[in-house]
Structures are given as structure tokens and as C-alpha cells.
Image (cartoon, rainbow, N blue to C red):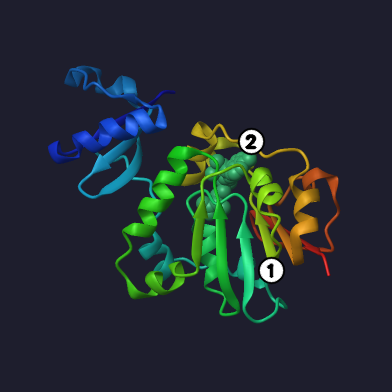
Amino acid sequence: MRFFLTSDDPKSKARALALSKKLNIEIFKKPPQKQIKEFSEDYFFTCSKGRLFLKKGLGQNSKPIFSDFDDWAKNYEDNLLKNSTKGLPANFSCLDLTAGFGKDALEISKVVNCKSLVLVEKEAWVFELLVDGIKNISCNRAGGLLKKFKTFNMDNLEFLESKNETFDLIYIDPMFLGVKKSKAKKHMQALRDLSTAVIQKELLKKSLDFANYRVIVKRHKNMEYLEAIVPNRSVKGKVVRYDIYNTN
Ligand SMILES: C[S@@+](CC[C@H](N)C(=O)[O-])C[C@H]1O[C@@H](n2cnc3c(N)ncnc32)[C@H](O)[C@@H]1O
């Protein structure tokens, strides 16, 4: 599996070149048509008209992967995650230490009591897609929710240690390693395939010191507790489990 940078319209070429340098991703040189199939397992970070997205393979049926906040604001609900925030005070602040595409952060922002969300993401190309997603929203609902967001492109442990700031809720969604690949949705599969950022050993332990009320950790339902720390309770769904650590 390889990772390339490309553009799908002539006006985006200069941006693609600049991003290739910034993100250190090789520019894709289009092969003859008959070789297209050889790229089916590769990823393409694509600059399009005013928009960035990721694609797997070069086939027409390969769907773009990006932070689609308009769609997630209107058509997606994670009631399990929202239920995990029950009991937090009015105007609570949240720190998402593993922001990825920002889909879970958007769910937390839908909780009426949530006032602000800080999103930290280390992987530069993921961060680029996240920021591009925020810039490109068009529906009012997403616009209102994203006003709560503030983003940082840095290592999460470094963030905790350097900012020395507390948050009412800290959210951690480490990659589900060891879970069968075929089960992962395309966004998560891309992160698993391409993200080189790793969660450091004592992230949960440290987070417990910086959370005023709660730390929530997302796990696959069959996974062991993160850092072997037993939560106060867990909220279990068909596929995922949210482990809840009370800190007050
Ligand atoms: C499973 S994904 C999170 C997905 C996210 N919850 C969403 O809704 O899109 C985990 C993310 O954590 C990021 N990550 C891993 N190690 C990190 C670190 N040390 N600092 C900051 N981000 C990190 C990965 O690059 C990846 O984007």
C-alpha cells in the first residue's frame, strides 16, 4: 500500500504541489490506463476544486473520504456516546485527544450542555482534512456546532503537558488494533492503514489528572481496558464500548 498526493483539476495543481512538500507525500504521476488496477490498494490525498479528500484506488466507484460535517450533523447520531456524557455540568468543556476526522467530537458538540471542544490530532494529513472539513461546511446546523471547535496539530501527551489546562471531559479514541480489518468503515480503515501517530503509554493515566469530571475511552466491545485501568462503568453497544472514568 502506497500513499500519493494528486489533484483532479488543473487549477488545484499548485496546491497539490505545495501540500506534497508540506505533508511529505509523493506526487502521483498518472500511469497508462491499463496499469490503473495496480493502484487499487493505494491511497490518494486529492486536491479538488476548493476541497481536499482521500481516495482508495483510482476506480470510479471509490468514494471520497473526508470530514463531512454537513452530513454528520444531519444524518448521523451516536446516542451511546451522547449518553456517556449524561450528568456532566452545564457549559462543560471537552478535550478530544484523538480527533481524527472529528466525527466523534461533532457528536459531543451536539450535547446541549457542551460549550467548547478542543481537538488534538498529531498526523499532519489527517489534520489537513479535518481543517478543510471545518472550512467547507454549508449547513447552519453544522455551522452552529463547529463554533465550539478549536483545533491543534500536535501530540496529545505533549498538549496535556505543555498547556497544563484542565477540561471537564477528556475523550480518547485509540485505534482499534487487532480487530478484523474487513469490519472497519472506510474512514477508520484509512486511519489504520496510514496514520503513523501512536498513543503513548500513560495517556489515560495523565488524562485522569487533567479531567475535572470525566474521561471517556472508546474501545471495541471485546477489548481490554486501556492501560489496564478499570473504569467506574461502561456503556456497551453492538460493536463499541465507552469506558467511563469519574475524576471528581
Ligand atoms: C481512531 S482515530 C480517532 C477517530 C475520531 N474519533 C473520529 O471521530 O474521527 C485515532 C486518531 O488518533 C490520532 N493519534 C494517534 N496518536 C496520537 C498522538 N500521540 N497525538 C495525537 N493524535 C494521535 C491518529 O492519527 C488518529 O487520527
> Where is residue 132 shown, x and y percent of the image?
36, 51
Q: Which residue shows up at 56% across the image and 60% down it? A: 118
> Where is residue 4 shown, x and y percent of the image?
35, 27
Which-is-in-front pick, marks 2 and 1? 2
Mark 1 Cα shell of 10 Å, populated few (<14), some (14-19), many (≥20): some
Q: Which residue shows up at 75% across the image and 54% down it? A: 207
- Above or below 237: residue 132: above
Residue 199, can we see it? Answer: yes
Q: In the figure, residue 69 lies in which quadrant? A: bottom left
Quick check: which quadrant has ligand 1? top right
Question: Disc 2 beta carbon < 8 A from ligand 1?
Answer: yes
Residue 108, can we see it? Answer: no
Report the side of 193 relative to 242 (left or right): left
- Above or below 161: residue 55: above
Q: Distance between the residues labelled 2 and 1?
A: 25 Å
- Above or below 171: residue 57: above
What residue occupies the far left of the structure in this picture? 10
Q: Quadrant of the C terminus?
A: bottom right
Check contact, mark 2 vs mark 1: CB within 8 A: no
Question: Disc 1 beta carbon < 8 A from ligand 1?
Answer: no
Q: Which of 42 and 89 is in front in this view?
A: 89
Q: In which quarter of the image is the N terminus?
A: top left
Q: Residue 84 carries which label?
A: 1
Q: What residue type is labelled 1?
A: Ser
Q: Which residue shows up at 66% across the image and 72% down it? A: 83
Residue designated by label 2: 198
Q: Between disc 2 and disc 1, whose residue precedes?
A: 1
